[in-house]
Image (cartoon, rainbow, N blue to C red):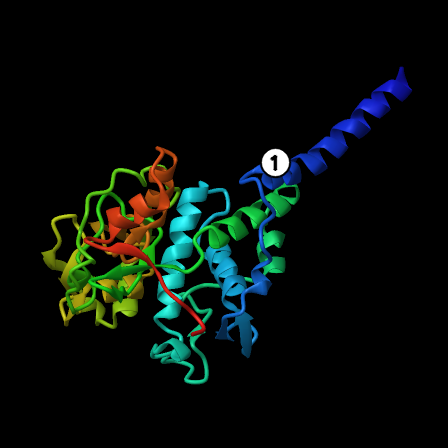
Amino acid sequence: MLKKAGLVLLLLILLLLLLPALIVKSCGGKTLPDAKGDPYQVTVWNHKTQELMRLPLGEYLAGVVAAEMPASFDLEALKAQAIVARTYTVAKIRAAGGAGCSAHPEADICTNSAHCQAWVSKEEATGNWPFFRQRSYWRKILRAVAETESQVVTYEGKMIDAVYHSTCGGSTENCEDVWTNPLPYLRSVQCGYCASSPRYTETLSLGAAQVAEKLGVPPEELKLTVLESTPGGRIIKVSTGKETLRGLEFRQKLGLRSAKVTWLMGKDGYSFTSVGYGHGVGLCQYGADGMARQGYLAEDIIKKYYTGVVVSRVKLGE
């Protein structure tokens, strides 16, 4: 009896080890190409290791998708992320006529998400995933990159500034309300797909002295007043009592998840409640997953968050 139970347990363990690989291999009906086999190269500054890397474009994009979007997301959301990341990257590559990375002149792009795009190696990515998901998740990301090969997002024949963020909190924003220059494809759109995001809302409590210090205002002068906001509720301009800040700068100085924020002032300080996570312009990543789970394809997702665009193919290496 004990031998039979042990045999059953051994078979279950083998099944758990092999099933994810078998499922992924059967999905799509063909073996996926290795991302390292991409002949087109991109020069990347790794801000963690402080080294310059020369990577095949496919390998780089797989690392971006793994870093920027949860691998548990629906395949169509991952494909949308791959297309957007490719667009952002190709527009930076000097050999393709891009301006390169302004912070690191020797590189096309860097791995600092605050400046360019996040990136992780295969080893880093798989190390962050459950053991039984490592192989299937990585192959899923490779599939997202491979099945969107050469696809980019264009507006009137030119590649767009393909910005994206985690969670919009109900609506995205016009780019000029967050930064300065308007772009016709970065328009505010309603989004009812990201409500399940774990980053949808956050409340942060800060003492009045902390707020004054972070904003560079003498405590006796601190007086927060919203001067202008978007229809969706994000702050465009706010007065600190000493100076006027744009919403993005206000959010960054206080360490808030979003400029879509309200606050209450009490005797112990301020309670800030933010909705969404990120700047709120362009692709909403959790919204993309919500759309994908309702049956929308990658191209549908992209056209939802970027107004009037086309998913085109770009010829690289010519």
Left-right relation of 73 to 188: right
Residue 273 visible in image: no
Decide which of 164, 158 is in the foreground and name it.
Answer: 158
**Residue, far bottom:** 105
Decide which of 4, 89 is in the foreground and name it.
Answer: 89
Left-right relation of 9 to 262: right
Identity of the residue drawn at 49% across and 57% down: 67
> x%, y% of residue 63?
52, 60
Identity of the residue drawn at 54% across and 71% down: 55
**Residue, far front:** 318
Identity of the residue drawn at 19% across and 61% down: 175
Mark 1 sits on what residue? 23
> x%, y% of residue 58?
51, 62
Residue 80 visible in image: yes
Q: Residues within 10 Å of mark 1 (few under 14, many from 20)?
A: few
* Amino acid on which disc 1 is placed: Ile
**Residue, far top:** 1
Left-right relation of 11 to 234: right
Q: How many marks?
A: 1
